[in-house]
Image: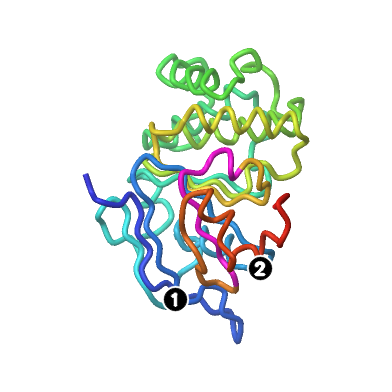
Amino acid sequence: MAEFALQIENLVKRFGGLVATDHLSMEIVPGEIHAVIGPNGAGKTTLIGQLTGEIRPDDGRITFDGRDITRLPVHRRSAIGLARSFQITNVLQDFTALQNVALSVQAHSGHSFRFWKPAAGDSRLEEPARAVLDQVGLADRADTPASSLSHGEQRQLEIAMALATGPKVLLLDEPMAGMGPDDSQRMVAILNGLKGDLTILLVEHDMDAVFALADRITVLVYGGAIATGSPDAIRNDPKVRSAYLGDDDDA
């Protein structure tokens, strides 16, 4: 096993005169939940885009499980075990929860989407799909159209779709976005249940969720990391409190 599940070395991304990622280096240890936090405009989503291959960095290197993937295309990264969720829910609204997850199982197995119709009801797809739905607390919603699921349930479904690809590293871009307290607590419980089974890089604004979940936290400001450490170390870091968390004890 590689020392790091994911390693980012001196990563740089510019958009014209804007430096979105500024010589960023960080390491993600296998099995940990590593959170990335920072104010709006800190470059968090740009970082996720570079890790998935949707955005090409201008400089630096990304290593996944010991392999340089800096120039690897999106589909190749997915095939070797890198999965993500999006800020905005990305499910097929007219398909049931089970069908959405079965499509992810099918896509990961290398079959074309055009074979979905005759594959409907195929136990080779449905059995693993049902197992993943159970894992995220949606077993009893398997036959419900995605359009009828609540916002929180759709976010759970998106996590299930990512898990169905059998990832080694899961990139989560604000999974609690738009959630109320109950849904957020449910998502925290789901992610806590995954801890140790796979590596998770979590970008999230909900600080209660971050401090409840993360083994380590990296704080981005203007595209660069100003601190990395345990939740307690980050909470008490003067640079972090000044730049992002604020100066009171409610941060």
- Crowd class of label 2 (few under 14; some 14 to 19; many from 20; radius 10 Å): few
Q: Identify the residue at horizontal 50%, vertical 68% (top origin).
A: 225
Q: Secondary structure at mark 2?
A: helix
- The span shown in magenta is 210-221
Q: Is residue 31 above or below residue 7?
A: above
Q: Identify the residue at horizontal 54%, vertical 30% (top origin).
A: 160
Q: Disc number at residue 242?
A: 2
- Closer to the camera in the image, 118 or 13: 13
Q: Secondary structure at mark 1?
A: strand
Q: Identify the residue at horizontal 40%, vertical 77% (top origin).
A: 59
Position of the N terminus by quadrant: top left
Instruction: Please count the marks in the image.
Output: 2
Q: Is residue 143 above or below residue 156?
A: above
Marks 2 and 1: CB-CB under 8 Å? no
- Closer to the camera in the image, 52 or 12: 12
Picture coordinates of residue 145, whole percent (x, y) = 70, 24
Camera-near label (2 vs 1) is 2
Q: Identify the residue at horizontal 46%, vertical 30% (top origin).
A: 194
Name the outermost residue toward the left. 1
- Crowd class of label 1 (few under 14; some 14 to 19; many from 20; radius 10 Å): some
Amino acid on which the number 1 mark rests in the picture: His
Q: Disc number at residue 247?
A: none
Name the quadrant containing residue 53. Answer: bottom left
Picture coordinates of residue 192, whole percent (x, y) = 52, 31
Quote the CA–CA distance across marks 2 and 1: 22 Å
Residue 212 sits inside the magenta stretch = yes
- Mark positioned earlier in the residue sequence (2 or 1): 1
Amino acid on which the number 2 mark rests in the picture: Ser
Picture coordinates of residue 155, whole percent (x, y) = 65, 35
The residue identified by callout 1 is 23
Name the outermost residue toward the bottom. 17
Q: Is residue 33 above or below residue 38?
A: above
